Image (cartoon, rainbow, N blue to C red):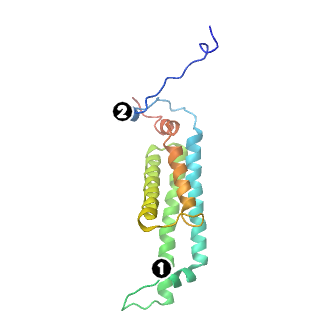
């Protein structure tokens, strides 16, 4: 027996796999250990939620200068401080709901929810696509101070959660 024959050679995978094969659960194992890719994906979603909280705090702290930069060309509306403050409350409310949803998704991902995994991957693809479209169509700059951190997080989340191990863990309770 040669040195190479003693090792188990893993089965090669084709470059293209039919969808029917990809949709089949890899193994029915409710006691499967949580893979690092699932932990990383949940951690990155949690990091994204924390970045959202920091963005909300920054927006609230600098709201007056942000509101002064917004130019409205509406004839009948006069911007009073009440309207500006109400707008801040609405914006922070919407962002707060998004952060809460991200936190819930991070928890569900860590626990192995396939639905949360698919939703987070779809949102990541949408975010990456809109960033690309903004860069392509409107020459939007992608810099460290603008969209680069969010883009990087979304790419890493997509890579982690689309792995075979994360998919197998999320679908570990499905029967063939």
Question: Residue 146 at x, y = what percent?
Answer: 56, 66
Q: How many neighbours does mark 1 have within 10 angstroms: few (below 14), some (14-19), or many (20 or more)?
A: some
In this rendering, is residue 86 above or below 135? below
Question: Residue 107 at x, y = what percent?
Answer: 54, 50
Q: Earlier in the sequence, mark 1 or mark 2?
A: 2
Kindly state the secondary structure of the residue where label 2 is placed: loop
Q: Quadrant of residue 46?
A: bottom right
In this rendering, is residue 67 above or below 171? below
* The furthest residue to the right: 3
Question: Residue 115 at x, y = what percent?
Answer: 43, 46
Q: How many neighbours does mark 2 have within 10 angstroms: few (below 14), some (14-19), or many (20 or more)?
A: few
**Marks 1/2: CA distance?**
49 Å
Q: Quadrant of the C terminus?
A: top left
Question: Residue 39 at x, y = what percent?
Answer: 59, 44
Asked if labels 2 and 1 touch by Cβ distance under 8 angstroms, the answer is: no
Residue 87 appears left or right of 153: left
Looking at the image, which is closer to me, 14 or 175? 14
In this rendering, is residue 26 above or below 97? above
In this rendering, is residue 169 above or below 42? above
Residue ID at (47%, 75%): 90
Q: Quadrant of the N terminus?
A: top right
In this figure, which residue is indicated by the disc labeled 2?
18
The residue mark sitting in front, 1 or 2, is: 2
Count of labels in the image = 2
In this figure, which residue is indicated by the disc labeled 1?
87
Residue ID at (57%, 38%): 35
Residue 100 appears left or right of 21: right
Kindly state the secondary structure of the residue where label 1 is placed: helix
* The furthest residue to the top: 1
Q: Quadrant of residue 48?
A: bottom right
Residue 53 is marked as none
């Amino acid at each position: 027996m040669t040195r190479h024959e003693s090792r188990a050679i893993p089965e090669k995978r084709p470059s293209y796999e039919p969808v029917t094969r990809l949709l089949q659960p890899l193994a029915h194992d409710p006691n499967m250990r949580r893979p690092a890719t699932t932990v990383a994906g949940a951690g990155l979603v949690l990091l994204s939620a924390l970045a959202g909280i920091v963005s909300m705090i920054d927006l609230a702290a600098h709201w007056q200068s942000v509101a002064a930069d917004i130019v409205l060309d509406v004839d009948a509306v006069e911007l009073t401080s009440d309207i500006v403050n109400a707008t801040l409350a609405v914006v922070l409310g919407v962002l707060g709901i998004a952060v809460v949803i991200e936190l819930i998704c991070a928890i569900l991902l860590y626990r192995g929810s396939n639905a949360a995994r698919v939703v987070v991957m779809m949102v990541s693809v949408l975010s990456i696509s809109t960033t690309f479209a903004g860069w392509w169509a409107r020459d939007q700059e992608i810099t460290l101070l603008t969209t680069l951190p969010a883009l990087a997080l979304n790419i890493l989340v997509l890579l982690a959660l689309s792995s075979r191990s994360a998919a197998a863990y999320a679908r570990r309770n499905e029967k063939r």
